[in-house]
């Protein structure tokens, strides 16, 4: 064998000895690299398994067994290994749950089994008729019904092959749907790799992708702050999110999924209920509200129970689904052209209350949009007292033919903000007057304008209308904009009302003495404010652009514009054609940017901000100039949480200044960048190995920031 020849050289001539040693070394290195890469592959598999287990505990079982930070550390290690050894990275790796920034158009795929809808019923009589039809259809044979919640999201069909998620497709038209696999991988309650080994080699499982109420409310609040259109309900939010082009945004939106229907040739049992219990063991989120029901009384009790209890669920539901449990009996009953004969949906009544419309007020947003709000006689609805309802726009007021004093129907339905759905016109007071939309701004009196194709009226006096100015300053200081966190709306209002500031540029002229006049013994407070205003000069250009509050330029649009256009000067000169050539920038946004840049007041404001040192261009990515190579290849571990930059920003800074960010502490680590609440084990290891531990401030000083 070759080995023998290498290790036991027979002739001891010098030349043959050297040759043999070289071959031996190459061989050892080869074996070592084999061993290393084998270890890497095993480690990747191990980390993937462990992370998936923790995902399942957290997102499906709702009982995490690891701290967020430890989870992040494992994830970072996996990301790093996959980056270095892409040959071992699987498309179903837990790292794919964070999504990638690459845009992909959706490919249309045909469903193996058409995705049908369910027949709807609205009363117990109709449910009884369904029960009767089933009974008859089965020739009076005994049968069981499975009662389930009807989740109000968007349906999804998942295909698994050998326990791995192969494809995820939306309902589409029922025959063809969009391939949304990449986005679906980011939904943490959907298993990418199944647990156990008793699943069919190939099967489909269908369910509902949902946005939980809490996530939906948070998302809409953020959108409201940024004056982006709100989602009407969690269903629209879930459907819209699943069809986003950017999986990283999908990942950040926190979708959830319940599975309720399995299809395939080798299902584990002949019973729908039992199959789903097995699916739960494989890692799917199957609702534990499912029940086997034996007669109409049990069905009625199930419906009555959930008609009340659904209000306490974390996700939206709009009814109950009743399914024949035996799959053989399902097949016997068959299908109509549109829906199965073995299942039916009972839809809950939307909750409705009647109350009096006392008045309508008109609010002015920071971009000047006028929102009509109905002031109602307080009324109890779905467990809360409703006093106000959004009327959205003039067209809605017209279509309702709303009069002051009308008794109106208020509904909560899937929407978080109650809406007026109808008017009791018969009980209208004789002298009531119709609600008219204001024609002048309720705050500054300027005639309102309504652009073609837009439903909203707005006040064009953007630079002299108080709520718009205050709103814009509040937006400017927000966390995702200039992050001047020592200021809040009340202080802004005080500054403005006392004439200390008239626009965002004035913030940079405030002195400690000025600010301190607002508060007795407020020098420390004032210093803090002035410092954080000064600090905002470091905020990158994309966020400055967002902070200006240009209509339709939200956080994402600002990032797109900044990375394509690079500087405020170039943005000022950009034409509609140049702007619309940027991905995701449509005509509406382009027009708004050009209009903003054509306004002399805005140009003066930008000019002043530039003079005060606010970032007006994208910092070019690091070239390895000596100045930027300060860290000189040093490996830096980041741990804990930080005040001035996020962990991701620190990672970027380390790379930018010539260092290497590594996930775990080892003998080769040079610095441990230690934030608040860092793990004691890491600290202990770093101390033991004599690694230099540096604070956030020390690090920033080190790189000269
Ligand atoms: S079973 C052939 N079960 O309701 C039957 N559907 O109109 C397939 N839905 O498109 C559906 N919760 O999006 C089923 N527990 C549940 C459901 C459910 C919600 C949705 C689903 C479907 C629609 C039917």
Image (cartoon, rainbow, N blue to C red):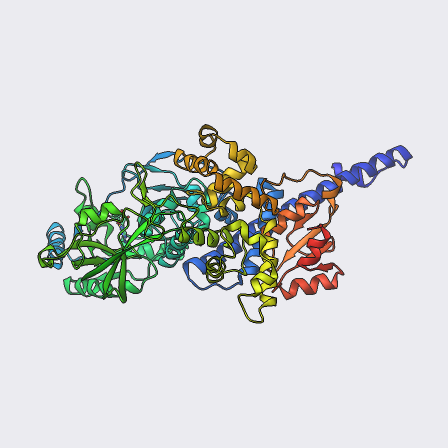
Residue furthest top in the image: 577
Seen in the picture, residue 216 relative to 579 is either above or below; the reply is below
Query: In the image shown, does 533 or 258 lie closer to the viewer?
Result: 533
Query: In the image shown, does 218 or 308 lie closer to the viewer?
Result: 218
Locate residue 271: give its quadrant.
bottom left
Horizontal and vertical percent for residue 641? 59, 60
Seen in the picture, residue 103 relative to 554 is either above or below; the reply is above
Residue 43 visible in image: no
Tell me if 199 is positioned left or right of 261 in this view.
right
Residue 387 visible in image: yes
Tell me if 36 is positioned left or right of 426 in this view.
right
Horizontal and vertical percent for residue 511? 60, 58
In percent of the image, x 43 and y 44: which residue is there?
A: 183
Quadrant of the image for the N terminus?
top right
Tell me if 47 is positioned left or right of 589 in this view.
right
Horizontal and vertical percent for residue 427? 10, 59
Locate residue 196: give its quadrant.
bottom left
Residue furthest bottom in the image: 521
Q: Total number of numbered labels?
A: 0
Horizontal and vertical percent for residue 590? 43, 35
In percent of the image, x 50 and y 31: which residue is there?
A: 574
Query: In the image shown, does 444 or 572 lie closer to the viewer?
Result: 444
């Amino acid at each position: 064998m070759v080995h023998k020849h290498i290790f036991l050289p027979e002739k001891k001539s010098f030349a043959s000895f050297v040759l043999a040693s070289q071959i031996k070394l190459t061989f050892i290195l080869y074996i070592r690299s084999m061993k290393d890469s084998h270890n890497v592959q095993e480690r990747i598999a191990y980390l993937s398994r462990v992370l998936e287990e923790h995902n399942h505990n957290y997102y499906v079982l709702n009982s995490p067994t690891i701290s967020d930070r430890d989870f992040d550390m494992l994830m970072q290690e996996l990301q790093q290994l996959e980056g270095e050894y892409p040959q071992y990275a699987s498309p179903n790796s837990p790292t794919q749950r964070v999504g990638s920034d690459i845009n992909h158009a959706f490919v249309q795929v045909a469903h193996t089994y058409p995705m049908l809808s369910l027949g709807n019923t609205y009363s117990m009589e109709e449910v009884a008729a369904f029960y009767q039809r089933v009974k008859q259809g089965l020739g009076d044979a005994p049968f069981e019904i499975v009662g389930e919640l009807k989740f109000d999201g968007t349906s999804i069909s998942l295909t698994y092959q050998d326990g791995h998620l192969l494809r995820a497709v939306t309902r589409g038209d029922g025959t063809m749907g969009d391939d949304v696999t990449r986005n679906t991988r980011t939904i943490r309650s959907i298993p990418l790799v199944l647990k156990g080994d008793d699943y069919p080699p190939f099967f489909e499982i269908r369910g509902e992708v949902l946005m939980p109420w809490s996530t939906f409310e948070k998302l809409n609040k953020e959108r409201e702050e940024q004056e982006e259109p709100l989602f009407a309900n969690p269903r629209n939010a879930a459907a819209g999110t699943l069809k986003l082009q950017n999986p990283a945004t999908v990942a950040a939106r926190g979708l959830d999924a319940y599975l309720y229907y399995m299809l395939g040739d080798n299902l584990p049992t002949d019973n729908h209920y039992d199959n789903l219990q097995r699916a739960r063991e494989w890692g799917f989120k199957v609702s534990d509200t499912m029940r086997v029901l034996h007669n109409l009384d049990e069905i009625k009790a199930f419906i009555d129970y959930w008609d009340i209890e659904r209000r306490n669920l974390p996700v939206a539901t709009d009814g109950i689904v009743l399914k024949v449990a035996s799959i053989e009996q399902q097949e016997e009953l068959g299908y109509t052209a549109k829906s199965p004969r073995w299942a039916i949906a009972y839809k809950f009544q939307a909750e409705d209350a009647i109350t009096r419309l006392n008045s309508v007020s008109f609010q002015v947003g920071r971009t000047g949009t006028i929102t009509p709000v109905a002031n109602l006689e307080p009324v109890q609805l779905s467990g809360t007292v409703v006093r106000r309802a959004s009327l959205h726009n003039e067209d809605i007021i017209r279509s309702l033919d709303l009069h002051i004093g009308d008794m109106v129907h208020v509904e909560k339905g899937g929407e978080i903000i109650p809406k007026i759905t109808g008017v009791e016109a018969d009980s209208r007071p004789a002298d009531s007057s119709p609600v008219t939309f204001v024609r002048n701004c309720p705050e500054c009196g300027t005639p309102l304008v309504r652009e073609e194709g837009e439903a909203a009226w707005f006040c064009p006096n953007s630079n002299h209308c108080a709520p718009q100015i205050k709103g814009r300053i509040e937006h400017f200081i927000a966390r995702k904009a200039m992050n001047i966190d020592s200021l809040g709306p009340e202080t802004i209002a005080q500054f403005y009302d006392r004439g200390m500031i008239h626009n965002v540029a004035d913030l940079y002229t405030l002195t400690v003495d000025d600010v301190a006049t607002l508060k007795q013994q407020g020098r420390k407070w004032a210093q803090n404010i002035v410092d954080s205003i000064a600090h905002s000069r470091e905020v990158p250009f994309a966020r400055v652009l967002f902070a200006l509050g240009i209509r339709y330029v939200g956080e994402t649009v600002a990032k797109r514009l900044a990375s394509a256009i690079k500087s405020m000067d170039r943005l000022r000169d950009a034409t509609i054609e140049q702007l619309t050539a940027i991905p995701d920038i449509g005509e509406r946004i382009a027009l708004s940017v050009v209009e903003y840049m054509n306004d002399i007041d805005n140009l003066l404001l930008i000019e002043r901000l530039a003079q005060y040192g606010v970032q007006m261009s994208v910092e070019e990515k690091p070239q390895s100039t000596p100045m930027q190579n300060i860290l000189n290849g040093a490996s830096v571990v980041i741990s804990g949480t930080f005040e001035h930059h996020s962990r991701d920003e620190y990672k970027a800074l380390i790379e930018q200044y010539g260092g290497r960010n590594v996930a775990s502490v080892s003998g080769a680590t040079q610095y441990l960048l230690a934030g608040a609440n860092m793990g004691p084990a890491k600290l202990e290891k770093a101390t033991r190995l004599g690694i230099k531990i540096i604070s956030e401030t020390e690090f920033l000083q080190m790189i000269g920031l």
